[in-house]
Image (cartoon, rainbow, N blue to C red):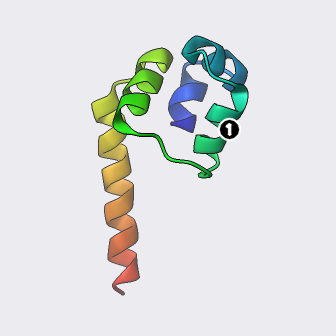
Amino acid sequence: MIEARKEAKLTQSHLAQSLKKPQSFVAKYENGERRLDVIEFLFVARAIGADPYSILQRVEQLSSSISCEETK
């Protein structure tokens, strides 16, 4: 999500304004202090102009590689 936001050339503040949320909302999910639910995720993806399916594929690939390393 951070990469996608930066690729869209948006700051946390600008994204938060688009979402009508405080900047801390963006900071907290980017820092892993909170998780986005599915609806929030779709709103954020739409606000940054990213394809939510592509983001989920990248997350799935990362989680697969992490779980594979844990079994070693």
- Residue 25 vertical position relative to residue 30 in the rendered view, above or below: above
Dividing the picture into quarters, in which one does residue 29 lie? top right
Residue at the limit of the structure toward the bottom, as seen here: 72
Pick the front one: 22 or 13: 22
Residue 32, image x and y in percent?
59, 52
Q: Position of residue 19 (x, y in %)?
A: 55, 17
Residue drawn at 71 percent across, 34 percent down: 24
Three-letter code, disc 1? Ala
Quarter placement of the C terminus: bottom left
> In percent of the image, x 50 and y 47: which residue is there?
35
In this view, the residue in front, 62 or 44, is 44
Is the residue 49 above or below the residue 28 in the image?
above
Residue in front for this viewpoint, 18 or 55: 18
**Left-right relation of 42 to 48:** left
Q: Residue at x 39, y 77 (%)?
A: 69
Disc 1 secondary structure class: helix
User: Which is more toward the observer, 23 or 69?
Assistant: 23
Give the percent coordinates (x, y) of residue 6. Answer: 60, 27
What is the crowding at mark 1: few (fewer than 14 residues within 10 Å), some, or many (at least 20)?
Answer: some
The residue identified by callout 1 is: 27
Residue 20 lies in quadrant:
top right
Q: Is residue 48 left or right of residue 11?
A: left
